[in-house]
Image: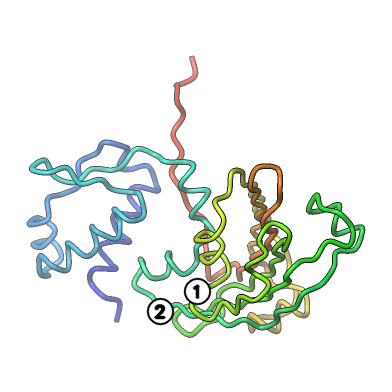
Amino acid sequence: MEPIYLRILKDIEAKILAGDWRPGHRIPREHDLVDDYGCSRMTVSKAMTALVDRGLVVRKRKAGSFVASPQIDRTVVDIQDIGTEATLAGFEHRYEILTRKIETLGSLEAAQVNSSSGAEVLRIQCLHIVDGKPTAVERRIILLDTVPLARDESFATAPPAKWLLSQVPWSKAKHVIRAVSADAATARILEIDRGEPCLNLIRQTWQSDRMVTYVEITHPGDRFQFAGIFHPAEKPA
């Protein structure tokens, strides 16, 4: 059975993402939510804390909780953080490093990542598992001339994305989100049928003018979604 705090979280999140509750809208007081859901104050507080951590809600002392103003930069940055999203939603997350090897870039791939042919990279394939189900396959290269510490890193205590954020402050990022069909290798890893619809995130980050990493993360279409709040700075005339 779904935990009550997770039901509260999802109900509030749905109203915000659907636009029913706009930025600045006052969230029902915690004691009202306690009555509505027939649960403890601690359960409601857990749901609200998760919503605050997601950037959807802000708490104001003595005033209550309100729908947060959109933070587009944060939405884009956090979109790939599978472990954090799973934990905030109350799910168990773990990951497995499937392959890890050091290679040199060929001319075609070097051009793709704006590097030089022959540059050394660490190539990693990682599987993310949420509540026991394969939820994403991550295929990543890390440029070793930018991040030399990655050469000997096993990623035993933190997945590649989280480790990189702790080691290299990036100055620019690019995201592309697209729909793809699962190829044979991806289908086997994610335990789905070949050709099944998937969501694919391509992310590149740079430190100044040097590329840090290039990654493709593929999710089964029915096990993940990208969501955010966007609000125009000005309304059109």
Q: Which mark is residue 158?
A: 1
| Callout 2 crowding tier (Cα within 10 Å): few <14, some 14–19, many ≥20 | some
Report x, y in % for residue 120. Answer: 80, 66
The correct choice, above or below, for 3 with respect to 236 in the image is: below
Residue 193 at what x, y percent from top left? Answer: 70, 80
In-front residue for pair 215/91: 215
Q: CA distance from mark 1 to mark 2?
A: 15 Å
Q: Is residue 132 shown above or below 210? A: below
Q: Secondary structure at mark 1?
A: loop
Marks 1 and 2 close (CB-CB < 8 Å): no
From the viewer's perspective, is residue 125 above or below residue 70? below
The amino acid pointed to by label 1 is: Ala
Quarter occupied by the N terminus: bottom left
Residue at image location 61% in from the left, 43% down from the top: 172
Residue situated in front as seen by the camera: 209 or 7: 209
Q: Nearer the viewer, residue 162 or 202?
A: 162
Please name the amino acid that badge 2 sits on.
Glu
Task: Residue 123: give its label.
Answer: none
Left of 105 or right of it: where is 35? left
Residue 92: mark in rendering = 2
User: In the drawing, does residue 15 fall left or right of residue 60?
Assistant: right
Q: Residue at x 64, y 65 (%)?
A: 217
Badge 2 element? loop
